[in-house]
Image: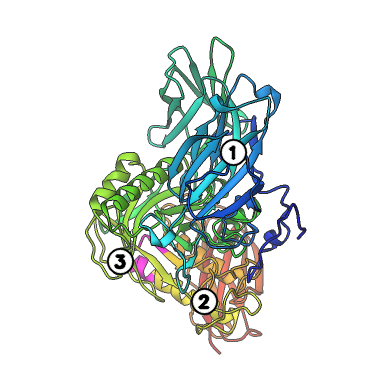
Amino acid sequence: MPLLAGWSPGAAPLMTTWGEQLNPDSVLDAYPRPQMVRSAWLNLNGLWQFQLASSLDHPPFNQTLNDTILVPFPIESALSGVMQPTDYAWYRRLLTVPEDWKGKRILLHFGAIDWQSKIYFNQQLVAEHKGGYDAFTVDVTDVWQFDAPNELIVGVYDPTNKGGQPVGKQNEQPQSIWFTAVTGIWQTVWLEAVPQVYIKNVLLLPDIDRQQLTITITLNADSSATQVVATAMADSQTVGSAQRYGSGQLILPVVNPHLWSPEDPFLYDLQIRTQTVSGQNDTVQSYFAMRKISLKQDEHSRARIALNNHIYFQIGPLDQGYWPDGLYTAPSDEALKYDIEMAKKLGFNFIRKHVKVEPERWYYWCDKLGMLVWQDMPNAANRTLSDREQFKQELGAMVRQLYNHPSIVVWVVFNENWGKFETQQMVDLVRQIDDSRLINANSGWNINGYDEGAGDINDVHHYPEPRAPQPEYNRAIVCGEYGGLWREVKGHTWAPYTGTGFASGNALATQYIALTDSVQNLIKSAGLSAAVYTEISDVEAEYAGLLTYDRKVLKCYYLPIYLANTRTVTTTIEQTVLQKATSFRLLPNFPNPFNDQTTIPFEMPRPGLVRLEVFTISGQCVFSAEKWVKKAGLSQFMVDLKQSASGIYFYRLKGGNRSAVRKMILVK
């Protein structure tokens, strides 16, 4: 990687491919807020002046700072070029904008700064902010100068775990499940030009039962003369529109909605524009999905999680959102997308984002690719009243900021009793902001705690085998963490490997399949609604990932994991969301276990071509056959595996756009 303007990356124990190829002139350059996109914007990511400090008492006005940092990578990260721990620091940059921004308001946006920040513009303090995970905006119009460069200075203070604010897994002495601390700017910084009256905020609430979208518009100024028009599009065709004057609600009809699900993540385009007498109009491009998450009782009166009014089992990985080279900040938008794509490839349908909040583009990719999200609130010590007030403030900010993303279906308030206080009141706080999603009050309450009965979900943790709480009629039961299967891949470790683990990918996959069998048993016996496997990738000295920390190696072949996960999901979908023909069924083979030959029956709702494939645990296809089914009803394949060894096999039936998976055992 080239040295540029005094900057070069630090020497991290591991680097991702994206980090190795990073161009400092083009850093995270995609528009950072996909649900409120404007055309007139300027990305401020890149090289800034920088220096460490001992306090924020003396802003370095009109001074050239003594170091360089690559924004928006945290100070402690290799990609920042600094890679040093600190409590205090200063950033400085000189700014100009295009001439055609004259006469407009100029907004300065910060995606996130950890933790406390002071923003100075042309030697004036224009904003102070506390909160390491939420975005904030500063209107710098009144202090902007067009005849000379503008001096932006950002002071940051972050006590990490010496303080009581939300920190997640950050620790100044990382070890075990606690990871390297981050400080300072860690999400995109950008400027935006808007008219004098502009759209300040948009809230989107879909209702699939009423077939409508409620849009709450907030303008920066209370102007009853400003008309607001919202138009929804599907495949470039208008499906609905609504209008009003000034701030307030719009009800936009969406007749016969195309529902969003992981199998079919359909997004509607949305344009919101203002019309004023002056002709200075604002336009934002957005999107939404018609999706519902709720509880529904099954035939045994047990509460189950339902997607779009159908019981829908969720299986997904724990995702801690760390990168070896960028720590909290992914080295590129492609990297941010990659973990989600890999989770999809492995057959997961949701991700639990663990005690960290991501940049909005991560949620955009979940929306677009079709990945449900359980969003954790980053944990805090919460020992003092002021700490607890700060926690409430940041909890509310997280929910409001991410409100519009259809992928998010569960808010997780506390994890394993860490910093837990006033549990029911915290659930009520979240519910007052967002009553359209489920709330998990305390994931893993059974770890050094007790269940207070709050929220919509009863969640226990257990390693390595999954466990389930007792079934309830008013709360869904889930296993919020299980698994944690370790495997070392030499040359791809952050720190010395000190644990025991699996020697091969096949051994890891075999145990993973055994754990999903246990998940299925809990679905059948207890009505389990979801299970979270630890975890999608290694993090520092924690080697429980399916991917290595540098994302360069998948520790086992993907297909057995995909088939095991798919089998778990498809066997529990009630009138499956995607498949309209519920009589498309793949039945258990017989005999099972079998010796050499077995019969695989299936049912088709109508005539058609079907294909059967049989895979080993390492993903090798050892048998395939096709047949044309001449009439609806039961049919079968005869499978001969004389040339195959004893072991676990998966068989998959495909017919049109439908498929089903089961497991069988060959014993010789």
Identify the mark at residue 526; answer none if there is no mark: 3
- Examine the structure image and report whether residue 507 is included in the region drawn in magenta: no
SS for callout 3: helix
Upstream in the sequence, badge 3 or badge 1? 1
Residue 507 is left or right of residue 433, and the answer is right
Determine whether 533 is above or below 114 in the image: below
Identify the mark at residue 45; answer none if there is no mark: none
Q: Disc 3 marks which amino acid?
A: Ala
Give the class, few, some or many, for how many residues have Cα within 10 Å of label 3's Cα (few <14, many ≥20).
some
585, 537: nearer the viewer: 537
Give the class, few, some or many, for how many residues have Cα within 10 Å of label 1's Cα (few <14, many ≥20).
some
Q: Disc 2 marks which amino acid?
A: Met
Asked where in the image residue 624 lies, by quadrant, the reply is bottom right
84, 589: nearer the viewer: 84
Image spot of residue 531 (x, y percent): 41, 64
Identify the mark at residue 152; answer none if there is no mark: 1
Residue 228 is left or right of residue 493, and the answer is left
Q: Disc 1 marks which amino acid?
A: Leu
What is the spatial separation of the Cα atoms under label 2 and label 3, in whole angstroms?
24 Å
Q: Which residue is mark 2?
A: 664
**Can you see residue 137?**
yes
What's the magenta region? 521-531
- Examine the structure image and report whether residue 529 is included in the region drawn in magenta: yes
Determine whether label 2 and label 1 are within 8 Å by CB: no
